């Protein structure tokens, strides 16, 4: 067993190596260009809900800046106290690890406010990489990432159980549609679309109903869309988990990968995977939201808004909206499915994060922190007078349900797909 001193030393070595590898010219420019003006402060839902300096975007960037200068700046190596008076490098690393996961959801709203366009989310990903590499990541996120990899490595052990579960869900779809011909195909070669769900019937049954009505050529994926290694900023594991999906798409010869209503899963497959591969994917990647919007516009889905008369609003997922540019597609579907649609203010590009993104909703010990950070979103919802809140991200869905309980909002939280099924003409 290593001594405490040796363990600390090893962590410092690992942290230095990670920073050296991850802080490229682009990130270093962002760190240096930040003048700590504080313009970004009011943009942060953490600060708005609990105003203290630790919740400011520039403070988070400052921790990385200090650590980087202590390791790599000639002056910082000789006079480390100049970059954090009375603070040891071990203390700074500990603060960095604490800040990495619990006080930022990487929503990127602060980047919009910054006059220099400093991407705090990119800086925070580096803090998460360092925290993960030094053994300071939340255990549950590590376990979930490892479980995803283990499922692929032991796919045959899970396949029969999975297929039995899908058969039961297929019966539900047949009951809803009143047709024994309705199907949930799995691993069917030649299907135009590979639909990648999350863990849960709510991300399979409604979508299967809509695919069957639209007479789509589709097949269901074996693996979940979620990629918890992305939350850890563990590049090696994140690539491995994503490759499960691309391999399956290649095996069934799909033309498109369709991602369930999940923010981080969509941005990972749509933007990150091609970057990791160094080339475009051989198939298109879309969110199920884009597909449903297409069905409604083409007349392949006929929705009756009169069947949903309660006041309804939509929460923009940070990943699908601000990072993915999917703003109007869900709104067109919701307006076709609900007669009393109301917008939150602000919305779209400037929408506030719900507080549960970037893996926080999975970490039970941070429940109070994230629910406090979501106070602003709860007030936005209350001001609309909505009774139904639609969101296109499962993390947002779980968070807003808990916000409703904490703040007595009395709302129903649902997905775009579920709302569409309820309004089928």
Image: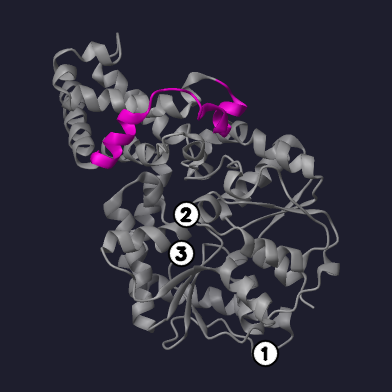
Residue 224, labelled with which disc?
3
Cα distance between the residues tagged 2 and 3: 12 Å
Q: Which residue is mark 1?
A: 180
Cα distance between the residues tagged 3 and 1: 26 Å
Mark 2, Cα crowd under 10 Å, few <14 / some 14-19 / many 20+, is many
First of labels 3, 1 by sequence position: 1
Residue 264, labelled with which disc?
2
Up-down: is 208 above or below 33?
Answer: below
- Measured from the top left, where is residue 212 in percent x and y? 63, 83
Can you say which quadrant of the picture contains the C terminus?
bottom right
| Residue ID at (57%, 21%) | 51
Residue 130: in sight, yes or no?
Answer: no
In this picture, which residue range is highlighted in magenta?
A: 23-51
Up-down: is 397 above or below 68?
Answer: below
First of labels 2, 1 by sequence position: 1
* Helix, strand or loop under label 2: helix
39 part of magenta stretch = yes
- Left or right? Give the position of 269 relative to 424: left
């Amino acid at each position: 067993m290593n001594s405490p001193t040796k363990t600390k030393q090893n962590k410092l070595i690992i942290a230095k190596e990670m920073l050296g590898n991850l802080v490229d010219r682009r990130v270093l420019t962002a760190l240096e260009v930040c003048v700590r003006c504080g313009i970004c402060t009011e943009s942060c839902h953490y600060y708005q809900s609990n105003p203290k300096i630790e919740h400011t975007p520039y403070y988070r960037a400052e921790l990385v800046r200090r650590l980087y200068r202590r390791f790599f700046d000639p002056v910082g190596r000789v006079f480390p106290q100049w970059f954090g008076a009375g603070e040891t490098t071990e203390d700074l690393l500990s603060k960095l690890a604490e800040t990495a996961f619990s006080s930022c959801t990487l929503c990127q709203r602060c980047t919009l406010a910054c006059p220099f366009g400093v991407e705090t989310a990119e800086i925070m990903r580096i803090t998460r990489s360092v925290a993960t590499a030094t053994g300071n990541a939340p255990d549950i996120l590590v376990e979930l990432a490892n479980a995803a990899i283990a499922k692929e490595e032991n796919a045959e052990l899970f396949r029969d159980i999975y297929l039995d579960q899908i058969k039961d869900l297929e019966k539900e779809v047949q009951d809803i549609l009143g047709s024994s011909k309705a199907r949930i195909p799995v691993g069917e070669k030649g299907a135009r679309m590979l639909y990648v769900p999350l863990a849960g019937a709510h991300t399979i049954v409604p979508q299967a109903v809509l695919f069957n009505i639209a007479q789509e050529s589709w097949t269901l994926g074996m693996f979940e869309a979620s990629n918890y290694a992305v939350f850890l900023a563990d590049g090696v594991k994140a690539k491995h988990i994503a490759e499960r999906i691309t391999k399956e798409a290649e095996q069934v010869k799909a033309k498109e990968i369709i991602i369930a209503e999940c923010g981080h899963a969509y941005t990972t497959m749509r933007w990150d995977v091609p970057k990791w591969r160094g080339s475009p994917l051989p198939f298109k990647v879309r969110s199920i939201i884009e597909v449903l919007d297409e069905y409604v516009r083409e007349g392949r889905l006929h929705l009756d808004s009169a069947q949903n008369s309660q006041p309804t609003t939509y929460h923009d997922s940070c990943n699908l909206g601000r990072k993915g540019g999917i703003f109007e597609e869900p709104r067109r579907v919701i307006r076709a499915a609900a007669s009393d649609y109301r917008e939150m203010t602000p919305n779209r590009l400037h929408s506030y994060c719900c507080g549960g993104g970037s893996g926080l909703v999975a970490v039970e010990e941070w429940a109070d922190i994230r629910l406090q950070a979501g106070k602003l979103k709860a007030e936005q919802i209350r001001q609309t007078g909505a009774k139904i809140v639609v969101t296109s991200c499962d993390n947002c869905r779980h968070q807003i349900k808990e916000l409703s309980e904490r703040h007595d909002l009395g709302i129903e939280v649902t997905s775009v797909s579920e709302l569409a099924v309820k309004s089928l003409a």
